[in-house]
Amino acid sequence: GCSTLEQEDDVDLEALVNNMNSSFESLYSNCNVKSELVPLVQNGQLLRGPAPRPGVDLSPLQPTSPRQRVRRSQPMHIHAVRRLQEEEQQLRPSSLPAIPNPFPELCSPAGSPVLSPGSLPQCQPSVFSEDGTGKVVEIPADMTARDLCQLLIYRSHCVDDSSWTLVEHHPLLSLERCLEDHELVAQVQASMTSESKFLFRKNYAKYEFFRNPLNFFPEQMVCAPSAFQNFLNPSSCPEIQGFLYLKETARKSWKKLYMFLRRSGLYYSTKGTSKEPRHLQLLADLEDSNIFTVIAGRRLHGAPTDFEFCIKPNKVRNESKELRLLCAEDEQSRTCWMTAFRLLKYGILLYQNYKIPQQSKMLSQFSSPVRSVSENSLVAMDFSGRIGRVIENPVEAQSAAMEEGHSWRKRSQRMNILGSFSPLHPSSLSSIIHRTQPWFHGRIMREESHKMIVQQGQVDGLFLLRESQSNPKAFVLTLCHHQKIKHFQILPCEEDGQMFFSLDDGATKFTDLIHLVEFYQLNRGVLPCKLKHPCTVVAL
């Protein structure tokens, strides 16, 4: 019985399509149409048919009975919309050009068959980079922070390593925070003042707590050992607790209180470290607030430490009285409180934001394979014989590399003496070639390098190189390890008339800073950790 019904449905569908095509053919033949071809639809395929003359009306007859109305599997005729276009043209301003809708049958009955440029709401946020350059970007109202970052990465020709982020910056309040990837840019911009702006920068610590949760949540601050997994579970009740400094309202003094961060909000105890409900006072709600980092908190608010942060209600613009200014004892405590705030507010959304770039990378590897240029994809080769061979012995590979390096250096020196195409001597080239690298920042102050490391996330391996202020011929490597920033001096040394750079008093020498950075990206050496994340600044 079922197969018979299916056959009848198939025959009925084919008959409907044939009747529709025959009706089109008879209609076109009666009108003697002889003009360009337009596509017709049959079983989802495009066919070519003659286009009607401007004066011919191809509107279908109105159905007179329910059985004549369009059924579920019946194809729909593409009817003309000339009269509706003329009416819409009279209502539309002449300054906006009309864009005909090629599929008017897909519009709602009350919808217009013409798509005007202003049909989709737009916003124009101003985005600035860390060097002060900026641009106005016109985006749709439903664009997320991740989508805008992808657009800026494409336009600025940056390397997409899933670490770029959009920062909400309030200069009058000295506050800033990284937007979550799912947040709507237009919605955030609506709550900002005219002085506020968006910054486009890297933040390597945005999802670092998913990779190394133990570094972000000390045991003494978390109630349960498995509390990190409970942050993503809305039915669980994790809790962060510890001492924080709270700035008293309308006063310059700070008070040290024992606080508790839960899904319902941030509380402080009115009696020591007591957790009894009668001793807990609500300080801030998570749903209607966002957490910000305070810039220069000691100078502005007289904070007891440098590790200040703030809970700002969404309705607050420039009223500093409504801000909840808090201060932690060290950077690890501040990072723990701010990360827990984000996890308790957004939960599984943060994990989804973290996994999306990982999944896209896996898909891109299958769709368009790109040759890897890592240390594992390169092997030592010997081309001294008739055919090349892979050098498997590591001692032989190292000696071959040293021999090749010496022969290249001698060859370049000989070419320079005889007259080479390059006007630069190898030694002078080695002294300036690092200026093209994104991790080199020239003559910047020690405080400026410290600020850049903090802004781009204090994760292990975040580094930059700069010129030394005390020694004009030396350089300084600024490196972050365990949320502490350390500085290592790179000194020049001379051997056999050749200039080298060394980080360990000449034990390991390099011809230029690029070789030095590449070596310490693969080997820790005398450093506390490998160089992993370059601290970069992009110009928009």
Image (cartoon, rainbow, N blue to C red):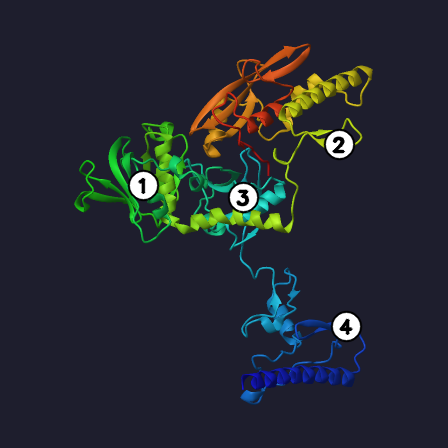
Q: Are marks 4 and 3 in contact (CB under 8 Å)?
A: no
In this rendering, the answer to whether 292 lies above or below 86 is above
Residue at disc 4, secondary structure: strand
- Name the residue tied to disc 4: 37
Q: In the rendered view, does 412 fall on the left or right side of 304?
A: right
Q: Amino acid at mark 3?
A: Ser
Residue 294: x and y, percent? 39, 35
Q: In the rendered view, does 180 fall on the left or right side of 240?
A: right
Q: Are marks 1 and 4 in contact (CB under 8 Å)?
A: no
- Name the residue tied to disc 3: 126
Disc 3 vs disc 1: which is toward the camera? 1
Q: Amino acid at mark 2?
A: Gly
Q: Using the numbered discs, state the Cα–Cα distance from disc 1 to disc 2 in whole angstroms.
A: 56 Å
Q: Tell me if residue 404 can be seen.
A: yes
Residue 331: x and y, percent? 38, 31
> Sequence order check: which comes first, mark 3 or mark 2?
3
Q: Amino acid at mark 1?
A: Pro
